Amino acid sequence: MNKYAIIDIGGKQLRVEQGRFYDARHLVPIRNTLKPNEKIVINRVLLIRHGSSINLGYPWLHDAAVRGRILHGCADKKLVIQRIQSKRKTRKIFGYREDMIRFVIDSIHFGGRSLNKD
């Protein structure tokens, strides 16, 4: 696709396109505040590519926004952590699953107009 944006979300940078879904962690600091089908707007847009033109932000583009909606909450793969002390012959194995939010991108806006209608 010729139209995409790079956003900063959850401490990571994602290359997003319209109509695709993505997983992000730490979307909001308070858990269970975002419900399914709730609309979100992401203003931390680092780059927008539309055809042959590329717009870079320093650090973000001020008049750009990526709009989408929450699909559902999910969990990442389980991380297994093993702590072994060989001389004492003790082993501790534990793990956790990180909470994620799956969202879909509806549109990419730059300069007050949607880039997806062109």
Image (cartoon, helix red, strand yellow):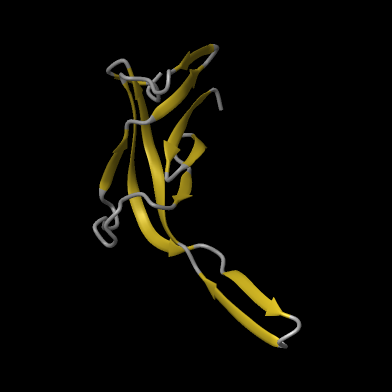
Q: Is residue 111 above or below residue 107?
A: above
Using the rendered view, name the quadrant where residue 99 is placed: bottom left
Residue visible at 27% across and 62% down? Answer: 32
Q: How many marks?
A: 0
Using the rendered view, name the quadrant where residue 105 is placed: top left
Horizontal placement of 109 versus 18: left or right? left
Task: Determine the residue located farthest toward the right in the rendered image.
Answer: 87
Q: Is residue 71 above or below residue 93?
A: above
Q: How far across and how far down the image is residue 30, in percent? A: 27, 57
Task: Determine the residue located farthest toward the top in the rendered image.
Answer: 53
Residue visible at 30% across and 19% down? Answer: 63
- Note whether residue 18 is visible: no
Q: Is residue 106 above or below residue 109?
A: below
Horizontal placement of 15 versus 29: left or right? right
Q: From the viewer's side, name the closer residue of 30 and 23.
A: 30
Q: From the viewer's side, name the closer residue of 29 and 87.
A: 87
Task: Determine the residue located farthest toward the bottom in the rendered image.
Answer: 89
Horizontal placement of 53 versus 90: left or right? left
- Note whether residue 35 is visible: yes
Placement of the C terminus among the 4 image quadrants? top left
Horizontal placement of 39 versus 88: left or right? left
Q: How far across and how far down the image is residue 56, in percent? A: 47, 16
Placement of the N terminus among the 4 image quadrants? top right
Q: How far across and how far down the image is residue 90, in percent? A: 67, 87
Residue visible at 51% across and 62% down? Answer: 76
Using the rendered view, name the quadrant where residue 73 is placed: bottom left
Q: How far across and how far down the image is residue 38, in percent? A: 25, 50
Q: From the viewer's side, name the closer residue of 70 and 95.
A: 95
